[in-house]
Structure formats: structure tokens, C-alpha cells
Amino acid sequence: MIKISIIIKTLNEEANVEKAIESALAAIAGYEGEVIVSDSASTDRTVAIATRFPTSVVVLEDASERRCGVGPQLGFQHSKGEYVYILDGDMELDAGFIKRAIAILDEQKEVAGVGGYIHEMRTDNLELQGRIKRFQRARRKGRLDVDCLNGGGLYRRAAILRVGYFSDRNLHAFEEYDLGVRLRSEGGRLVLLEDKAVDHFSYAMGTWQLLWHRIFSGRFLSSGELFRAALASQYVGRVFREVRIVPISIGVWAYWACAVLVGLLTQPAPVLLTALAMPIAVMTVRTRSLNLGLFSVLTWHLSAAGFAAGILKKRCPPATPIRSKVVQSAA
């Protein structure tokens, strides 16, 4: 076993992967470590660029299996580090953070994972602005222990092996939450430092363009997929308490069921129009923005539709090996 494995998960990241790899190699300097590029069958030059560096490169064989949960698990299959960091292909890792995280894991054996501040380099759409606010809530000053390490973290391999697998390959999102809740169920602590862990160069898209991208990539199935995962791993109660979009999705269905029922008993058109306008008006007042109000309500409804579809999706056993090919081995 070596000290640290850094897994870089990629899908069509030719514009960013070079800097991600360089930052990962710099972070493991001075340690016995490895960098693994775990690629979800990119159609651009991502893999070709990755092979220029002293990295292992593994590629998903079946592109239809693309999920956010596939990349980390695929990389983990090929890793051998005592500690494992998961890095997105559009991120640049801070070497200083890795040193601090390793020190904590070396000294505090009950800690299963250590994360840090995600510095968002692009904040020109509403989704990313909302993500920043969620991360800020998660890292309230003086708070260390958290539910999950959103945006990546350094994990203890032994803790991952105790819970069976690194990342649920069935999930289009929430794979970090799923890992976090499984680790916590085994008594592991997740620590979020105020130190910067990465610079994140997210999608250069506007709000609505990114929204449609999320739809076509299957991301809106994730709340239902997570609910299925929670049923399988017996943490449904925690999902309702800790993942806001799950009760919201169920609430949207209940809200419209009540609205339709009232409409059938009275006057359908006025009732349904009022039911449609009311949440938009409330969110517009709350957020002080019509665009943000519309975006929030639309996102809720898309998530509610995806919740139903995600629950119905067939799951494969999460620990089943993912079919892949090794393009380059750094060993």
C-alpha cells in the first residue's frame, strides 16, 4: 500500500484536465503516491492529454453507464493508497491542503475523511451561486464535523472498505452524500476545514443552458436514485432530515395532488392557476429576484419528476466491478 491515491474523474475535460493533473502531481510530491485519471468514455482529447503525464488512465467501457457515481468507484478499483482523494477534472488541487488533511488522518484514527473550502472560479449562473451558499452553510465558522464532503475530500481507505464501496455507481448525483452517510453509520467522522482545498472551474454556461444540460445528462433523476440507495442501505430517515430536495420533491407531488383535488371540487382553472403562481410569488419575494424565484420553482418541479423516475430505475449492485480498460499504467 502507498500513502495516497488521487483519483481525477473526467468526462470531456480537455480544457481543464492538464492543470488538474499537474496540481495532483504537485500535491503528492514528497509522498509515495499515485494519480489515476478515471474517465467516463470521453469523446474529446481528455484521455490523450492524460497519457502525457506519469498517471494511470482507466476508461469506462460502456458509455451508457455514465453517472457521477461511476468515476470515483472506477478509480478506486484501480487505486492502492492508504488515503484516497477524489478530484473533478475541472479542479486544481491545493498541495498545502493535502498536507494538512494527511496530518489529521494520521493523528485522528476516528476521522474517515477530510474536506476543505471549494473556491468557485465561475459564479455567473444561479446554480453555482446556490452551490456557494450551500457550501458556506456547511462550513459555518468553528464547525468541523459535517454530514458529507461535497466537492471532494481525502478519505481513509480502511473506512471505505468497511462500508463496502467508495461511490454508488447508480447515482447521477449525491454520491458524496451517500458515501458520507455510510461512513457515519460506521462511526466515522467527516471533517470540513476552512482551508481552501481546490479551485473549481465549473461549466462556462448560463443559468438556463446549464439547467437543460442537467436535464439531458440525467442529473434530475438523482433524488429518486438516492432514495432507492437509502432504502437499500437503510438510511431513509437521514435522507429526509439532511437532503432538502427529497422532501421538496415529495412535497411538490403532494401540493399538486391537493390542488387538483380542490380544483375538481370547485373551479379547476382558477385553482390551478393560483397554485402555479403562488410558489413563484413566494420565492420571488424570498429571494428578491423574479429570475431566481422562477428558477427555484422550475428546479423543484423537475426534481419532483426526476424523483419519480429515479425511484423506478433499475439498480445494479454498487460494489460490482465496473467494466473498464487500462489505457496507461504508471506502475
Image (cartoon, rainbow, N blue to C red):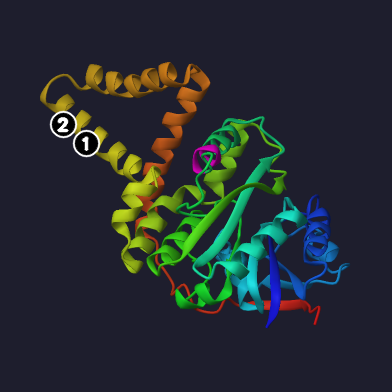
Is residue 40 visible in the rendered structure shown here?
no
Along the viewing direction, whichever of 67 and 115 lies nearer the viewer: 115
Instruction: Check disc 1 and report the residue beneath it.
Output: 257
The segment highlighted magenta reads: 134-138
Above or below: residue 73 compared with residue 221: below
Q: Is residue 303 visible?
A: yes
Residue type at mark 1: give it: Ala
Quadrant including the N terminus: bottom right
Residue assigned mark 2: 261
Callout 1: SS: helix
The image shows residue 59 at horizontal and vertical percentages of 70, 71
> Is label 2 in contact with label 1 (beta carbons under 8 Å)?
yes
Q: Is residue 207 left or right of residue 174?
A: right
Q: Residue at x 38, y 53 (%)?
A: 224
**In magenta stretch: residue 81:** no
Displayed quadrant of residue 280:
top left
Q: Regarding mark 2 in the picture, which secondary structure is present there?
A: helix
Picture residue at 59% right of the left edge, 68% below the top: 107
For residue 193, above or below residue 153:
above
Left or right for 140, reference 242: right
Q: Main secondary structure of the magenta part?
A: helix
Where residue 182 appears, as percent x and y from the top left, is 42, 65
Q: Residue furthest left?
A: 265
